[in-house]
C-alpha cells in the first residue's frame, strides 16, 4: 500500500464528529474501524472540527482525508459523498459560532495561511439523527465499512 | 439607518461565540427598555444524567459539556468529589492539575483573542478575512494555541476531552523527561505571548466602565486557576461549601440557562455580578507572576480593569501568566509516588470550584454510601454573567442610540464577545434583534 511520504510528509485521516450526537459520530467510528487496517504511515485522528485544531492536525501532510457526517435537506441517511478539494476549488463557507465552524471555515483559514495539505479528500455521509445519544442510526451504521474501505482506497491511490 | 423615532433592527446569527442563542434589544424613542440574552441551545440535563452514576464518573461525563474548557469541568468535579470523600490532593499531583489547567487557559484564551475577538477591533468580519491581511499574527495565535494543546495532550492524553484525569489525580503521571520537550515549546511560546499583550494593548477601546460586583477565586498569593476560595470586590469571602448560600440561581422566561444573583449587603438590587478575566485580574493582579505583572503594567492595565472591552488585554496577560506558571511547575516537578490519591466513597456532600477561562465554575455532588451520585449541581460562568452582560448592553446601547442600525449591531456583537460567553456550558446563544418602537 503506497502512502505519500515524500520528504517525511504523511497522510492523515481525520474523523470529525461527536459520538454522543448519534450519527455525528460516523467520522470517529470510521477512524475506529480503520485502526489496524490503515498503513502505519497514516495518522488516524478524531477531531471536533474546530479549525485551528484541524489545521494543526494536518500540518505538513501531503494527503488529508476527512470523514464527516453532514446534514442534507432533504436527507437520505447513509448516502455517501466524496469530494476532492484543492486550492483551486476550496473556499470559506461563512462563519457561525466556533461550535458551528464548518470544514469550509477550516479550508478558508488554511488557504489564508497557506496551510492547505497537498490534497484534501472529504468523505461525507448524510446523517439521519444528530440528536443527543450514542449509537448510529441503522442507515448510517450500514455504510461505515463502505466508508472505511473508501478511505483505504484513497490512502492506496491518493491521486485517484 | 432609518430616521424614524421608533424602529426595529434584526440581526441573525451572531458569530464567534460558543454555542447558540440570541439577543433582543427593545428601544422606545431614546430609551432602552429591555435587553435580553435569549439562550435557545437545548438544555443539556447534565445534572440529571449524573444521578445514579458512580462517583468516579463526573470528570469524564462533565468534560463533555464543553469542547473548549473540559479541564475546568473535570477539575471542579474532581475537587467536589474529593471533598465529599474527605481526601486531599496536594504535592506533585496538585501541581500536575494546575499545569493541565494552564494548557486549557492558553488554548482557550488564544482561540478567543485571535480567532473570535481581535477581528472586531481590526474591522474584519472574522478570523479568516483577518488572516488574509495579518497572516503572521494569526500564525502566532495558532502557535500559542498549539502550545496549550501540547500540555493538554501530554497530561490529558488528548487535547479535547482529556482521558487521563480521574478523581484523586491522574491515571498516569508523566516523568520529568516527558515534560522536557514541553518546556522547550513553552519557552518558545513565551515571547509570542508577550507580543500578544503588546499587540492587543494597541487596539482602540470604547470608553466604558462596568460597575458590577466582581467574583473570583483567591489562592493564597498565587494567581487563581485550578483552586481557591471565593472573594468579591465588596469584601465577601467564602468557601466553595458556602457558594450556594451566596449565589442564588433562578429561572427566567427567555433563557434555558438559569440566571445567578449574588446575595449580600450593598449589592445591586438584581444581585448581578461578574466573574471571569476582569474579575480575576481586578481581585488578584497583585498575585501575577513577574513577567505577566510586567506585561500588564506595560499594557497600562493598572491594579484593576473595569472596561470589558479591555478584557482582551487581560486574557493576553493571563496567557503569559499560564505559560510562566507552566514553566515553573515543570521546572519544580518531581513525579509523585502515586498518580492518584486513593479515594473511598462515603455518604457525604462535596463542593468544588475552579477558574474556567470564562470564570468561576462550581460543582456540588451529594454521594450515597455505595458511591452512587444522589444529586449534582453545576453552575457555569456564563449563566452567572448573564445579568451583568445584559446590564452592560443596556448601558452601552443607551449611550450609542445615535449609531446607525448596522454599526449599533456590530458594536453590540463586539460587546457580547467581551465576555467570551460559552452558551454550550451555560445551557443551558447568537442572534441579535434590536427593536426600536
Image: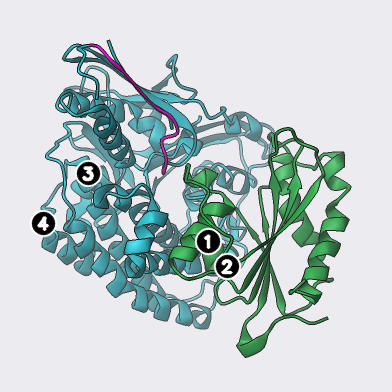
Chain colours: A green, B cyan
Taking B232 as reference, is B111 left or right? right
> Does dot 1 land on a helix, a strand or a loop?
helix
Q: How far apart in space, not on screen, are marks 3 and 4 (Cα)?
A: 14 Å
- Position in image of residue A123 (x %, y %): 73, 57
Numbered tag placed on residue B309 in the rendering: 3
Return the chain for callout 2.
A
Placement of the C terminus of chain B among the 4 image quadrants: top left
Q: Are marks 3 and 4 on the same chain?
A: yes
- Position in image of residue B288 (x %, y %): 22, 60
Return the chain for callout 4.
B
Q: Is residue B331 visible?
A: yes
Nearest the viewer among B189 and A83 is A83
| Picture quadrant of residue B164 | bottom right
10 Å crowding of disc 1: few (<14), some (14-19), many (20+): some
Q: Are marks 1 and 2 on the same chain?
A: yes
Q: Residue, x 42% and y 16% (percent of image)?
A: B252
Q: How far apart in space, not on screen, are marks 1 and 4 (Cα)?
A: 32 Å
Taking A64 as reference, is A102 left or right? left
- Contact (CB < 8 A) between labels 2 and 4? no
Numbered tag placed on residue A57 in the rendering: 2
Numbered tag placed on residue B300 in the rendering: 4
Placement of the N terminus of chain B among the 4 image quadrants: top left
Taking B9 as reference, is A138 left or right? right
Task: Report the mark closest to the observer, 2 or 4.
Answer: 2
Return the chain for callout 3.
B
Vertical order, A138 against B108 (above or below):
above
Q: Which residues are magenta?
A: B6-16
- Contact (CB < 8 A) between labels 1 and 2? yes
Q: Which residue is mark 1?
A: A53
Amino acid at each position: 500500500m503506497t502512502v505519500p511520504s515524500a520528504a517525511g510528509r504523511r497522510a492523515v485521516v481525520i474523523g470529525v464528529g461527536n459520538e454522543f450526537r448519534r450519527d455525528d459520530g460516523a467520522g470517529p467510528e470510521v477512524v475506529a474501524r480503520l485502526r489496524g487496517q490503515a498503513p502505519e504511515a497514516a495518522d488516524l485522528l478524531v477531531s471536533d472540527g474546530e479549525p485551528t485544531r484541524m489545521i494543526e492536525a494536518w500540518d505538513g501532510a501531503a494527503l488529508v482525508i476527512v470523514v464527516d457526517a453532514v446534514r442534507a435537506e432533504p436527507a437520505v441517511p447513509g448516502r455517501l459523498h466524496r469530494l476532492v478539494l484543492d486550492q483551486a476549488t476550496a473556499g470559506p463557507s461563512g462563519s457561525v459560532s466556533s461550535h458551528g465552524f464548518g470544514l469550509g471555515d477550516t479550508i478558508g483559514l488554511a488557504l489564508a495561511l497557506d496551510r492547505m495539505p497537498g490534497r484534501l479528500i472529504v468523505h461525507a455521509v448524510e446523517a439521519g439523527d444528530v440528536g443527543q445519544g450514542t449509537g448510529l442510526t441503522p442507515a448510517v451504521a450500514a455504510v461505515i465499512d463502505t466508508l472505511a474501505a473508501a478511505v483505504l482506497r484513497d490512502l492506496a491511490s491518493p491521486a485517484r | 439607518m432609518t430616521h424614524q423615532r421608533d424602529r426595529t433592527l434584526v440581526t441573525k446569527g451572531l458569530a464567534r461565540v460558543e454555542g447558540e442563542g440570541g439577543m433582543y434589544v427593545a428601544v422606545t424613542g431614546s430609551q432602552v427598555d429591555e435587553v435580553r440574552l435569549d439562550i435557545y441551545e437545548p438544555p443539556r440535563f447534565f445534572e440529571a444524567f449524573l444521578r445514579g452514576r458512580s462517583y468516579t464518573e463526573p470528570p469524564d461525563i462533565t468534560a463533555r459539556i464543553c469542547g473548549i474548557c473540559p479541564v475546568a469541568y473535570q477539575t471542579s468535579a474532581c475537587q467536589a468529589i474529593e471533598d465529599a470523600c474527605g481526601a486531599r490532593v496536594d504535592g506533585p499531583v496538585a501541581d500536575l492539575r494546575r499545569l493541565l489547567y494552564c494548557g486549557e487557559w492558553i488554548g482557550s484564551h488564544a482561540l478567543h483573542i485571535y480567532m473570535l475577538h481581535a477581528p472586531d477591533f481590526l474591522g474584519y468580519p472574522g478570523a479568516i478575512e483577518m488572516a488574509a491581511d495579518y497572516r503572521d499574527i494569526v500564525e502566532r495565535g495558532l502557535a500559542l494555541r498549539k502550545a496549550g494543546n501540547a500540555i493538554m495532550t501530554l497530561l490529558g492524553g488528548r487535547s479535547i476531552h482529556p482521558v487521563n484525569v480521574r478523581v484523586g489525580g491522574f491515571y498516569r503521571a508523566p516523568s520529568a523527561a516527558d515534560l522536557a520537550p514541553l518546556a522547550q515549546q513553552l519557552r518558545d511560546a513565551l515571547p509570542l505571548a508577550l507580543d500578544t499583550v503588546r499587540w492587543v494593548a494597541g487596539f482602540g477601546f470604547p470608553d466604558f466602565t462596568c460597575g458590577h460586583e466582581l467574583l473570583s477565586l483567591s489562592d493564597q498569593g498565587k494567581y487563581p486557576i485550578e483552586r481557591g476560595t471565593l472573594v468579591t470586590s465588596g469584601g465577601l469571602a467564602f468557601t466553595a461549601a458556602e457558594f450556594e448560600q451566596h449565589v442564588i440561581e433562578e429561572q427566567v422566561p427567555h433563557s434555558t440557562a438559569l440566571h445567578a444573583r449574588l446575595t449580600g449587603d450593598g449589592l445591586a438590587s438584581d444581585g448581578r455580578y461578574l466573574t471571569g478575566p476582569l474579575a480575576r485580574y481586578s481581585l488578584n493582579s497583585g498575585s501575577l507572576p513577574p513577567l505577566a505583572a510586567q506585561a500588564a503594567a506595560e499594557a497600562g492595565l493598572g491594579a484593576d480593569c473595569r472596561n470589558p472591552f479591555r478584557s482582551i488585554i487581560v486574557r493576553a496577560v493571563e496567557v503569559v501568566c499560564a505559560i510562566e506558571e507552566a514553566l515553573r511547575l515543570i521546572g519544580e516537578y518531581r513525579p509523585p509516588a502515586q498518580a492518584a490519591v486513593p479515594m473511598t466513597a462515603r455518604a457525604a456532600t462535596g463542593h468544588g470550584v475552579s477558574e474556567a477561562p470564562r470564570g468561576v465554575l462550581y460543582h456540588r455532588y451529594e454521594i450515597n454510601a455505595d458511591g452512587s451520585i444522589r444529586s449534582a449541581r453545576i453552575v457555569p460562568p456564563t449563566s452567572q454573567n448573564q445579568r451583568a452582560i445584559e446590564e452592560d448592553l443596556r448601558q452601552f446601547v443607551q449611550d450609542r442610540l445615535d449609531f446607525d442600525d448596522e454599526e449599533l449591531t456590530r458594536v453590540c456583537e463586539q460587546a457580547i464577545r467581551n465576555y467570551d460567553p460559552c452558551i454550550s456550558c451555560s445551557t443551558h446563544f447568537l442572534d441579535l434583534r434590536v427593536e426600536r418602537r
